[in-house]
Image (cartoon, rainbow, N blue to C red):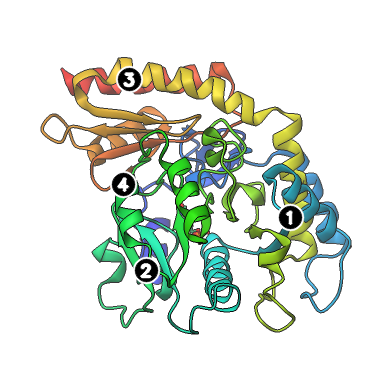
């Protein structure tokens, strides 16, 4: 038995990893146990936006771990205030509730929305409705998969929590029709990531903002994957110049080394949580907070948001040009591009395998879309290295 088989024998098969055993990572590169180095063009689904082993993150990680890591929130610890102040400053929100994973921060947002509906909007307790979009991905808890439109996420896991109303993504009229006096919130990804980087029509988010204002509904945006520079803005909703009533961040906030997430909102919304109403042993721990703060400072000082916009436009244009008849569409913003492969011409799954053999790590979504999301720290030379390999693979497949 090799190491992969030994792992498979004891690890639940809830993922289907490529048969590559990674050993170490540095910047945009991942090296396997045989010593083969490949370019990471998926960044742990945006969790590794700063690249592997960013020196400033590693420094804070080791210094804070030696000093103080986990105490629970039964005590105050020094890094939490500066971290959340910075997070509020970059997102334009007033307060934050720290969590660990994206799904936990989404759960936090759902609780906030329901309590707000009940206490502020006077919706009877238990009757609040939250509007969500078809094709959404917000995590894997039973509440969250309960409103997923993906049957494989739900199969056999019911019963599910009521109170969610699903409408087509990108269709503002459908949302307008779905709003009732019991609607507390719209919970949506500004760009759907797991669905295959689906960008809604221009003006969609502005229309949702207007609907929320008109009907006194909270607009809660899940930017776990799209946030922190991935789309060439700090947050994807800033492309439409709108304000969110609630914002969910995660993934890249952990600097690629640690789970760090948060739900952000106004002081009024956050005041709905009192001691005892919500929490997590690890949420907001000193180590997480120190890393989160450093991740935000690195994004700012290394101009990763601007670099994502510049490099992303270049990457998208080149992917468009090189995929030609292979692709049904090439879409996305910043360093976040989905290439939808025409299944009559080639299989995305097979292409991902060929790309890995050629030295480029990506991942297919829903059988047809290949997602390109390299670390935002990628240099033009590294990007060119990867794109040259992609070009060779795509040319061969289209021949
Ligand atoms: N929301 C979005 C938009 C995501 O893309 C993801 C993860 N892919 C999550 C939430 C869940 O995050 P986590 O896996 O950290 O729970």
Q: Kindly state the secondary structure of the residue where label 1 is placed.
A: loop
CB-based contact (under 8 Å), mark 1 and mark 2: no
User: How far apart are the two marked residues, 3 and 4, measured between alpha carbons?
Assistant: 26 Å
Q: Which residue position is annotated with label 4?
A: 171
Which residue is at a point 74% across and 55% down the rendered structure image? 94
- Quadrant position of the C terminus in the picture: top left
Residue 160 rendering spot, x and y as whole percentages: 35, 79
CB-based contact (under 8 Å), mark 3 and mark 2: no
Q: Earlier in the sequence, mark 3 or mark 4?
A: 4
Which residue is at a point 52% across and 38% down the rendered structure image? 31
User: How far apart are the two marked residues, 4 and 2, measured between alpha carbons?
Assistant: 22 Å
Q: Which residue position is annotated with label 3?
A: 320
Disc ID at residue 145: 2
Q: Kindly state the secondary structure of the residue where label 4 is placed.
A: loop
Q: Mark 1 or mark 2, which is nearer to you?
A: 1
Kindly give the residue lying farthest to the left in the view shown: 344
Describe residue 301's horizontal placement relative to residue 5 as left or right. right
Disc ID at residue 94: 1
Q: Kindly state the secondary structure of the residue where label 2 is placed.
A: helix
Mark 4 residue crowding within 10 angstroms, few (<14) / some (14–19) / many (20+): some
């Amino acid at each position: 038995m090799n190491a992969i088989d030994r792992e498979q024998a004891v690890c639940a098969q809830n993922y289907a990893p490529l048969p590559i055993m990674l050993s170490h990572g540095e910047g945009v590169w991942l090296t396997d146990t045989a010593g083969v180095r490949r370019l990471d063009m998926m960044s742990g689904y945006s969790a590794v936006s700063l690249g592997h082993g960013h020196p400033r993150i590693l420094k804070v990680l080791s210094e804070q771990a030696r000093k103080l890591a986990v105490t629970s929130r039964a005590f105050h610890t020094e890094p939490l205030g500066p971290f959340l102040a910075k997070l509020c400053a970059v997102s334009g929100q007033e307060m934050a509730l720290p969590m660990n994973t994206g799904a936990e921060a989404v759960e936090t947002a759902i609780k906030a929305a329901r309590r707000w509906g009940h206490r502020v909007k006077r919706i009877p307790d238990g009757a609040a409705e939250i509007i969500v979009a078809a094709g959404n991905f917000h995590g894997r808890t039973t509440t969250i998969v309960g409103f997923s439109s993906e049957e494989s996420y739900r199969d056999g896991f019911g019963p599910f929590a009521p109170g969610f109303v699903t409408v087509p993504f990108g269709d503002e009229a459908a949302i307008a029709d779905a709003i009732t006096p019991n609607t507390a919130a719209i919970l949506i990804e500004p760009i759907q990531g797991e669905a295959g980087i689906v960008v809604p029509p221009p003006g969609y988010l502005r229309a949702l903002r207007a609907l929320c204002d008109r009907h006194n509904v909270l607009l809660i945006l899940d930017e776990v994957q799209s946030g922190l520079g991935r789309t060439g803005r700090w947050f994807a909703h800033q492309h439409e110049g709108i304000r969110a009533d609630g914002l969910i961040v995660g993934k890249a906030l952990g600097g690629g080394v640690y789970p760090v997430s948060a739900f952000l909102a106004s002081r009024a919304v956050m005041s709905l949580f009192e001691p005892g109403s919500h929490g997590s042993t690890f949420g907001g721990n000193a180590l997480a907070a120190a890393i989160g703060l450093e991740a935000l400072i690195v994004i700012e000082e290394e101009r990763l948001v601007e670099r994502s916009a510049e490099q992303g436009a270049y990457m998208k244009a080149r992917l468009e040009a090189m995929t030609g008849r292979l692709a049904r569409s090439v879409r996305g913003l910043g360093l976040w591009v989905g290439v939808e492969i025409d299944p009559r011409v080639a299989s995305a799954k097979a292409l991902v395998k060929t790309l890995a053999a050629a030295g480029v790590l990506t991942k297919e979504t829903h059988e047809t879309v290949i997602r390109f999301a390299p670390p935002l720290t990628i240099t033009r030379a590294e990007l060119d290295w990867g794109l040259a390999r992609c070009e060779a693979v795509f040319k061969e497949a289209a021949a």
